[in-house]
Amino acid sequence: MGSSDVPPAHVPTWVVPLSTVALGAGVLCWDAAYILMTLRSLKTKSYSMPLLGLALNVSWEIIYALYVCEAPIETAGFTFWLLLDNGLVYTTVKFAPHEWDKTNPWVGRHMAAILGGMTAIGCVGHFAFVSWWLSRPGIGHGDKSGKWYFGQDEYDTTEMAYWSAGVAQLVDSGGALAMLLVRGHSGGTSFGIWFCRTTGTVFGMGVCNAILWHWWPEAHSYFVNPLGIFICGTALLCDLLYPFALWQVRRTEVMLPDGRIISRSEAGHAQRVEKKDI
């Protein structure tokens, strides 16, 4: 986002390109995370991303690829993300029946319809937000002069993406931590996945916007807005707590012969049932 920005004279010429490099690094880390998530899910016969987080991410990428993107490289990036999403969606639908078998089997059996419905609602929500944001110039924090979008000034797609991606990231980070603790096993996840997605978020949401805020503060004060700090700070806190929770879970989980991983409590329950049958 913001590839057409023309900063004022006091902003060094390298600021926008450097921010773009940081954003690109974040994108590459998330690409790696998506690939690792799919591979880990297939290996452990589970799925990686919490349902609401997956629905919000897929719908965000659909709306930005089809409606928001201006530059071809932006469209290509979002389209590639959507292609990588296929692996996440496939493993979620395929392995949901097992993950939901002990809590709500109906959800597992109807995961395709549930995820499809959630994604459709997410598309409506994201479209409502971006269509409002782009309805007139000047929406957002500060002076938007130099924020060009399809030949029109004062349309800040960088801030727009910051808010919409920030909400999706908060849901995904919080949901991933909660899902790990509830499951009690590391199926679909790993320390490598955590590192890639956390690094991707730090660069894609943090570093790239921090660069713009430091050198071009009049247009990027949203970065230090209390709501923005809460959204991104809470997401980052969840990401920082995640490896400790993952370490604890991996100490107690049980791997089955077919590669699936289950919690210690589920393994104990299975053993008790087996003894009872004998």
Image (spheres, rainbow, N blue to C red):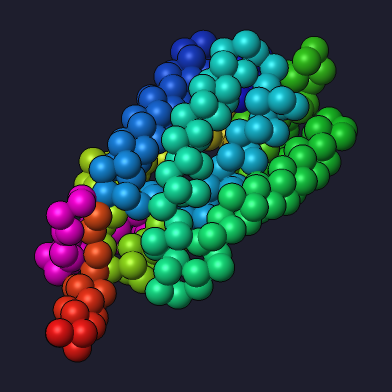
Q: Residue at x 80, y 12 (%)?
A: 151
Relative image position of residue 165 (x, y in whole percent): 57, 42
- Left or right of 127? Residue 29 is left
Relative image position of residue 196 (x, y in whole percent): 31, 37
Q: Residue at x 45, y 75 (%)?
A: 103
Magenta part of the chain: 235-259
Whether residue 95 is situated above or below residue 151 in the rendered picture? below
Relative image position of residue 4 (x, y in whole percent): 66, 14
Quadrant showing the N terminus: top right
Residue 241 forms part of the magenta stretch: yes
Q: Residue at x 22, y 76 (%)?
A: 270
Residue 145 forms part of the magenta stretch: no
Name the residue at the right extreme: 136
Relative image position of residue 268 (x, y in whole percent): 18, 79
Quadrant showing the C terminus: bottom left
- Residue 173 in sight: no
Residue 234 found in image quarter: bottom left
Whether residue 105 is situated above or below residue 137 in the rendered picture? below
Give the total number of marks visible in the rendering: 0
Name the residue at the front extreme: 278
Whether residue 163 is situated above or below residue 20 in the rendered picture? below
Residue 7 found in image quarter: top right
